[in-house]
Each structure stands twice: as C-alpha cells, then as structure tokens.
Image (tube, rainbow, N blue to C red):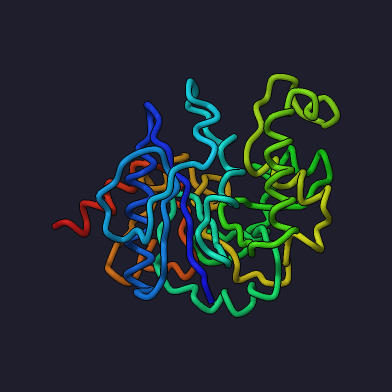
C-alpha cells in the first residue's frame, strides 16, 4: 500500500506548530519505523523524520490571521499518498497503530468519532460538543481523519473548502452565535452530515480514537493537565499516572511539545 501520515502545521505568533509536528513525526517513527510521514507547511524544518515537506498547494488562505483552519481542505491534494491518515500537530504517538490500515483501506473516507480519557475509557462528555448537539450533526473529531484518493474524499474536502469560504452565510442556517468562527470539527461534522455518515465515518471501529487531554474529558480541576497529573515519557511509551497510553495522545497544551523534545535530547 502507498500509505502514510500527513500533518498540517503552520506557525503562529503564539504557537510553534511545526515543533509539535516534528515531535509527532519522531514519535511515529519510534513505534512504526517503516511509516511515512509528510509535513504540509509553509514553514521550514530540519526534522529528519519527515518523508517529505510539502507546501500548501494553493498557498496560505489566511496570511494575515492566526486562524489557519481554512487551509485544512488542501490536505487532500497535498497528500503524496494513495491512503492517508491526517493527524493534528499537537499529538504524540505512544504505540503503533499500523493495524488500522487493514481496516481503513476498504473505505474512501473515515473521520474519527471516538475519544478517550487518559484512563483509556471512551468519553461521552458533551462539554465541548454544543454546536454538534444543537445542530444534530455527526460526532466527528477531525484530529484523526483517514482518506483514500477517491471521488468521495475529493468531494468531502472540496465541500470543506466551500463551507469555510462561505461560513458567514452557512452559519445563519445553523444554531450558533452569529460571530462564531468555524472550527475544523464543526465543518467536518457539517460536511459529514451533508454527504452521509455512512460514507464519512465508521463508528464501530472505536480503536480509531485518541486520548484527548481537555479538562472536562478527564475530570480535572484546571485546563492544564500537567498541573494535576504525573506523567512519564519513554521512547516507546507514555504513562499518565502510571497508565500506559495506548492510543494517539492529543495533549492539547501546546507547551508539551517542548517537554517531549527536551526529554529525548537529554
């Protein structure tokens, strides 16, 4: 299979997303040494873990803004692989997910619909899902998205582009605040609804999930989980309160990428 992971990362004034992507790529290569990982970015990197570094095919559609989500739709054309898993940059790969490919390859498009807490339990919290619930949309998480070069996936990302570019009009047909900008999760959920959940999700495959370290998913007193939970980083594992993390780890607090880098440079 011509398969690989892609990570979109564009630095902003506040966050070094390329550093996050570098640490994610290196963690992938530690647990899946034969994997291919490509970076899609308009920033430079010297990270050897990347198979390719690819410019945004249509350039930065938000050059004067730190809100770069509008560029997400370009991932379909930018990916050099026939089969692609797109990952958000602020993640860490503590264990191999290579077995996913055998299940996903039969599909054109799968946006993940499952998240877990650090104890590995599937989370059903609705704390961050008001827009999804109010508009009765599929419960999608764009942070892990699989697609095959296909008409279905091409149409999905073309529609994502259309929704981002016309959000001010589309927003008026939905239940949300009049001034709220589109998030990628919202847009993916809306497009999955338009195209049909049966074509864009695979809820029975709950292994296609991530550990999401947001506060209310993990019942923590503060937003920064590092203030509350003891963690250990090792070359082939990550433990939180001694519990090995068995799924992609969405650490959410961007400063954790520097901690990862420091851990492996000691």
Name which quarter of the figure residue 210 lies in.
bottom right
Question: Which percent across, then down, holds residue 231?
Answer: 33, 58
- The single residue placed furthest to the left in the displayed view is 266
Front residue of 71/241: it is 71
Q: Residue at x 21, y 52 (%)?
A: 262
Relative horizontal placement of residue 5, taking residue 71 as reference (left or right): left
Q: In the rendered view, would you say 58 is above or below 87?
A: above
Q: Which residue is drawn at 64% across and 61% down?
A: 114
Q: In the rendered view, would you say 65 is above or below 7?
A: above
- Work out which quarter of the rendered image holds the C terminus and state it: bottom left
Q: Residue at x 48, y 25 (%)?
A: 63
Front residue of 23/59: it is 59
Name which quarter of the figure residue 129 lies in.
top right
Numbered circles on residues, count: 0
Question: Which percent across, then down, holds residue 116?
Answer: 57, 61
Q: Which residue is drawn at 51% across and 55% down?
A: 87
Name which quarter of the figure residue 49 lies in.
bottom left
Question: Which percent across, then down, holds residue 132?
Answer: 75, 43
Relative horizontal placement of residue 33, taking residue 84 as reference (left or right): left
- Work out which quarter of the rendered image holds the N terminus and state it: bottom right
Question: Which percent across, then down, holds residue 50?
Answer: 35, 58
Relative horizontal placement of residue 183, taking residue 47 as reference (left or right): right
């Amino acid at each position: 299979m011509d398969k690989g992971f892609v990570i979109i990362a564009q630095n902003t004034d506040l966050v070094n997303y390329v550093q996050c992507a570098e640490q994610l790529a290196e963690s992938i290569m530690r647990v899946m040494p034969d994997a291919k990982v490509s970076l899609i970015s308009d920033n430079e990197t010297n990270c050897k873990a990347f198979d390719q570094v690819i410019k945004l095919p249509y350039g930065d559609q938000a050059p004067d803004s730190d809100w770069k989500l509008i560029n997400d739709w370009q991932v379909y054309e930018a990916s050099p692989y026939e089969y692609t898993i797109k990952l958000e940059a602020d993640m860490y790969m503590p264990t191999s997910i290579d077995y996913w490919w055998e299940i996903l390859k039969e599909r054109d498009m799968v946006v993940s619909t499952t998240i877990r807490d650090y104890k590995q339990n599937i989370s059903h919290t609705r704390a961050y899902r008001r827009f999804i619930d109010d508009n009765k949309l599929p419960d999608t998480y764009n942070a892990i998205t699989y697609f095959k070069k296909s008409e279905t996936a091409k149409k999905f990302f073309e529609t994502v582009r259309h929704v981002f570019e016309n959000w001010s009009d589309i927003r008026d047909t939905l239940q949300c605040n009049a001034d709220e900008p589109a998030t990628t999760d919202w847009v993916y959920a809306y497009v999955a609804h338009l195209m049909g959940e049966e074509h864009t999700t695979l809820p029975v495959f709950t292994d296609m999930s991530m550990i999401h370290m947001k506060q209310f998913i993990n019942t923590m007193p503060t937003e920064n989980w590092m203030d509350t939970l003891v963690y250990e980083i090792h070359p082939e594992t990550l433990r939180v309160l001694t519990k090995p993390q068995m799924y992609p780890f969405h650490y959410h607090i961007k400063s954790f990428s520097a901690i990862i880098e420091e851990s492996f440079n000691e």
